[in-house]
Image (cartoon, rainbow, N blue to C red):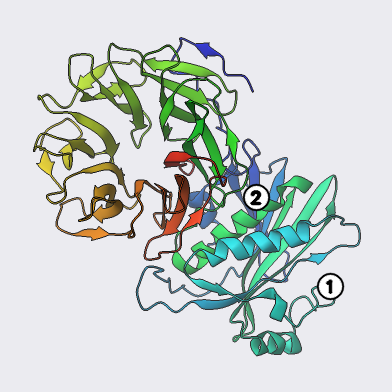
């Protein structure tokens, strides 16, 4: 892949940015009632579900076509007249996990390959990490997917109750045109009813993305919030004596390097639409701020002022960028207008002020400063006014990342032994909670777009790697390749 560098920024935005799921494939969703022919369509543009469009289709109004995409159509088999749902708080301490069975999909007569197995495996993995489901071991399943009745009959439901299943996800895959058609349905085993379902048509290579989409939809059905499955994590990987940017899917699939500068590339940060990565690089021997287009692989220089130019954070509306510059001496925080590149200085003191991060609504900014002696977290208004300290304990606090819900700020701090751990604090600084423990460093927290997970770098297995864990859980899953030294994760956003 090429990484040519030009000196024009900002780039012209494409009408639709690349998807986080198929990196460019437009999707369409089709909904139909169970065992019926009424249908409607919602849009997934650039590989990302647009929830506001999707939710509008669950109303009881007559169905109508909205749009049809060329690569993936998703037919949703959903009861239109379903009663109001009771949503589940996954993070509540009293939540009991639902026993979930996901057998391999039924394979159509013309379908070849292992897509029917792949989709089931990914669904088990995704839903098994959600904190809501206890995925049953498929070795204990009694039913043969190829011979199972569709929909399940009384004997089928009895069989799934025998193995302990409360929720069942079944499906089938078959050839359609030049690609595949995949139908997935979720059933309540005890009530013997369908909860909802979807039908996808896609290229034969899209099985992994289909599974992620259905896992997100199922999680939203139970909790009111879609999952993060199918998103990506950018990070910094050691490459000889240099450091390069890399990407990996949140489940550890598809790791790949995205820069080949032969120098130091650091501090990746996503643009609001997920098409670009900001990062700081020593490509021209000085720490300058760059922008990488993940579709065309073109690179732009964003800032090359004297001194440091540290990676920026897009504002929630995507019009402004937070950067750290030392052009006037010590590092200070600036707000850059992306259309004019005009700078507004937000901090002005002798201290080091770095690592700014927007609140979700864009009215506040959290940052790190040593103005109190040691590095601590501070919050200010978007214009730099109203600065107040958020952390008051510990000798070193940094790496702040504001949660998508706005209720928590994750950060790195040292515990009483001097080991780096990940903590969260409310924006008022009243409640600090430690999330990670142990004798090895864990730092650089980055929120998933749904606020359920954090990506971190950790030396828990020796060499530093990128791990993902769910809030309230101590189950860490390494997503960067084994043996690769990796730091500074940055989780991709959803589509705007």
The percent coordinates of residue 250 (x first, y second) are 53, 49
Q: Dividing the image into 4 quarters, which one contains the C terminus?
A: top left
Counting residues from the start of the chain, the first of labels 1 and 2 encountered is 1
Residue drawn at (33%, 27%), measured in percent from left and top? 321
Horizontal side, residue 171 vs residue 331: left or right: right
Secondary structure, mark 2, is helix
Nearest the viewer among 115 and 470 is: 470
Residue drawn at (50%, 75%), measured in percent from left and top? 83
Horizontal side, residue 145 vs residue 69: left or right: right
Residue drawn at (50%, 24%), measured in percent from left and top? 292
Secondary structure, mark 1, is loop
Nearest the viewer among 16 and 433 is: 433
Q: Residues within 10 Å of mark 2 (few under 14, many from 20)?
A: some
Question: In the figure, 163 relative to 362: above or below?
Answer: below
Question: In the figure, 259 relative to 363: above or below?
Answer: above
C-alpha separation, residue under disc 1 versus residue under disc 2: 23 Å
Badges 1 and 2: C-beta atoms under 8 Å apart? no
Horizontal side, residue 41 vs residue 231: left or right: right
The percent coordinates of residue 124 (x first, y second) are 62, 65
Q: Residues within 10 Å of mark 1 (few under 14, many from 20)?
A: few
Question: In the figure, 318 relative to 102: above or below?
Answer: above
Q: Which residue is mark 2?
A: 209
Is residue 38 visible in the rendered image? The answer is no
Residue drawn at (43%, 41%), measured in percent from left and top? 489
Q: Which residue is mark 1?
A: 146
The percent coordinates of residue 53 (x first, y second) are 52, 50
Is residue 206 visible in the rendered image? The answer is yes
Horizontal side, residue 28 vs residue 280: left or right: right
Q: Dividing the image into 4 quarters, which one contains the N terminus?
A: top right
């Amino acid at each position: 892949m090429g990484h040519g560098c030009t000196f024009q920024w900002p780039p012209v935005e494409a009408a639709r940015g690349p998807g986080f799921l198929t990196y460019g494939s437009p999707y369409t969703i089709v909904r139909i009632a169970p065992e019926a022919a009424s249908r409607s369509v919602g849009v997934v543009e650039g590989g990302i579900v647009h929830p506001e469009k999707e939710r509008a289709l669950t109303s009881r109004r007559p169905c109508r076509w909205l749009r049809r995409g060329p690569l993936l159509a998703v037919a949703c088999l959903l009861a239109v007249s379903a009663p109001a749902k009771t949503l589940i708080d996954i993070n509540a301490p009293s939540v009991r996990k639902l026993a979930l069975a996901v057998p391999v999909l039924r394979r159509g007569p013309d379908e070849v390959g292992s897509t029917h197995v792949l989709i089931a495996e990914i669904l088990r993995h995704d839903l098994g990490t959600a904190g809501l489901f206890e995925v049953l071991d498929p070795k204990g399943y009694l039913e043969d997917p190829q011979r199972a009745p569709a929909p399940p009959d009384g004997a089928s439901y009895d069989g799934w109750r025998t193995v302990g299943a409360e929720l069942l996800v079944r499906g089938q895959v078959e050839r359609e045109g030049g690609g595949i058609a995949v139908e997935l349905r979720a059933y309540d085993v005890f009530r013997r009813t369908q909860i909802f379902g979807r039908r996808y048509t896609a290229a034969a290579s899209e099985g992994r993305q289909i599974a992620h989409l259905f896992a997100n939809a199922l999680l939203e059905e139970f909790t009111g919030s879609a999952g993060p499955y199918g998103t990506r994590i950018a990070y910094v990987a050691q490459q000889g004596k240099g450091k390069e940017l890399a990407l990996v899917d949140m489940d550890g699939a598809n790791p790949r390097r995205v820069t080949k500068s032969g120098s130091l590339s650091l501090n990746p940060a996503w643009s609001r639409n997920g098409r670009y990565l900001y990062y700081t690089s020593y490509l021209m021997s000085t720490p300058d701020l760059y922008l990488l287009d993940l579709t065309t692989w073109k690179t732009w220089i964003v800032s090359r002022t004297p001194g440091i130019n540290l990676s920026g954070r897009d504002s929630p509306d995507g019009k402004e960028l937070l950067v750290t510059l030392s052009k006037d001496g010590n590092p200070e925080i600036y707000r850059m207008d992306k259309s004019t590149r005009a700078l507004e200085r937000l901090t002005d003191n002798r201290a080091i002020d770095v690592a700014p991060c927007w609140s979700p609504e864009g009215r506040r900014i959290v940052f790190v400063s040593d103005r109190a002696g040691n590095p601590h977290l501070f919050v200010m208004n978007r214009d730099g006014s109203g600065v107040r300290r958020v952390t008051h304990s510990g000798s070193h606090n940094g790496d702040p990342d504001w949660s998508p819900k706005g209720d928590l700020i994750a950060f790195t701090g040292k515990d009483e032994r001097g080991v780096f751990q990940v903590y969260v604090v409310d924006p008022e600084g009243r409640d600090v909670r430690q999330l990670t423990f142990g004798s090895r460093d864990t730092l650089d927290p980055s929120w998933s777009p749904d606020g359920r997970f954090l990506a971190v770098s950790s030396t828990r297995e020796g060499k530093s790697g990128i791990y993902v864990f769910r809030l309230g859980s101590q189950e860490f899953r390494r997503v960067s390749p084994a043996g690769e030294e990796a730091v500074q994760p940055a989780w991709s956003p959803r589509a705007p």
